[in-house]
Image: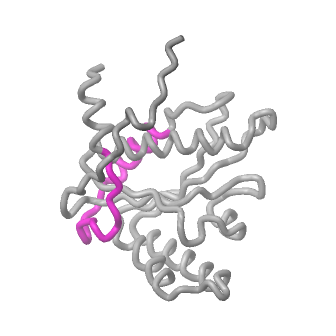
Amino acid sequence: MQPDLFSRLARSRSSVFPDQFEAGKQVEDAIIREILENANAAPNHGREQPWHFTVFSGEGRQRLARIQADLYKEKAGANFKEATWLKLQQNPLKASQVIAIGMKRSANKNIPEIEDIEAVACAVQNIYLSVAAYGLGGYWGTGGITYYEEAKALFGLGPDDRLLGFFYIGVMAVPPVRNKRIPVEEKTTWINQ
């Protein structure tokens, strides 16, 4: 293992949004499978592995766009925004693949739900790092229909499960600009005695 390589990878990871993807460029499904294998290696409590991924590629992206836009239009009510509706129709088509991020509630109810959510977030971090390692762009979005109860069944999730968003993957048109970070010293307390 080479810690300096990992440090460079972790510190160069960045969100790359669908508008920043190169139109029409596809990522091989074999690479997506490798990325998901890396996600599957995430830590989790009780070996429950609560993540569930639904991958939309090819024409499946159009299906996702339609599902999202239709459900949003149906459920948004007074909060409906045409810009959001259009974005839900367009963004899946800008990506090479879109992965719906699901959390299947652990069978062991002694494990708090938050620990299942945290395990899925660790899996998503592995996706982020893998996408960066392949030189691709990626973005985890939690807008649109993510928190609609009615959306869960569309992704193979039951009543106790959660839809935690969508991860968009594509070939970057231009390298992302890394956001400045507050120095870690300002966010760390050391207790030595």
Residue 48 occupies quadrant? top right
Residue 193: x and y in percent read 54, 11
Residue name at image x 31 percent, y 71 percent = 19
Asked if the magenta segment contains residue 30, the reply would be yes
Residue 137: x and y in percent read 30, 55
Asked if the magenta segment contains residue 191, the reply would be no
Residue at the extreme front of the image, as rendered: 193
Residue 51 occupies quadrant? top right
Residue name at image x 27 percent, y 43 percent = 12
Residue at the extreme top of the image, as rendered: 193
Per the rendered image, the range of residues in magenta is: 13-39
Image side of residue 138 versus residue 153, left or right: left
Residue 85: x and y in percent read 51, 83
Residue name at image x 60 percent, y 32 percent = 44
Residue 98: x and y in percent read 44, 61
Identify which residue, 34 or 70, lies in the foreground.
Answer: 70
